[in-house]
Amino acid sequence: MIRLPSGAPNMKLRFQVRELATGSLVEAGVDHVRIAISGCATVTGDLNADRVVDAADIAALLNAWT
Ligand SMILES: [Ca+2]
């Protein structure tokens, strides 16, 4: 697993194959590569974590106001 820096807008994945000795035959294959995104971006002001800032967040704020 490779962790990318947060906020990275792009990603490049490169596989590199090279000879270990002259005259050798290099063959390579890439199989079963899986890219997954885990976690989620936070939305500023989203107090109830439904990824939308709306009246429910204001209500949550007012209900927490003591
Ligand atoms: Ca919300």
Image (cartoon, rainbow, N blue to C red):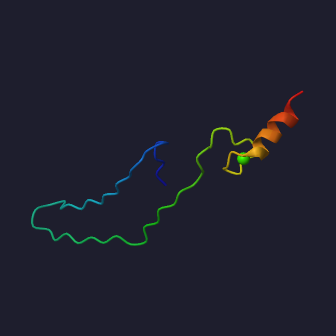
Q: Is residue 38 above or below residue 47?
A: below
The quarter of the picture where residue 13 lies is bottom left
Left-right relation of 3 to 25: right
Give the total number of marks visible in the rendering: 0
The quadrant of the image that shows the C terminus is top right
Query: Would residue 2 be found to the left or right of residue 26 on screen?
Result: right
Residue at image coords 26%, 59%: 16
Farthest residue, direction right = 66
Image position of 8 (left or right of 40): left
Q: Position of residue 39 (x, y in %)?
A: 60, 51
Camera-nearest residue between 52 and 35: 52
Picture coordinates of residue 41, whole percent (x, y):
58, 47
Quadrant of the image occupied by residue 25:
bottom left
Q: At 20% from the left edge and 60% from the top edge, which residue is drawn? A: 18
Residue 51: x and y in percent read 66, 50
Nearer to me, 61 or 22? 61
Residue farthest along the left direction in this orientation = 23
Which residue is rendered at x = 47% and y = 62% of the image?
35
Q: Is residue 28 above or below residue 66?
A: below
Measuring 48% from the left and 48% from the top, which residue is drawn there? 3
Q: Find residue 59 and report its image quarter.
A: top right
Q: Nearer the viewer, residue 8 or 47?
A: 47
Quick one: which residue is furthest to the top in this view?
66
Note whether 11 is above or below 60 in the view shown.
Answer: below
For residue 61, above or below residue 23: above
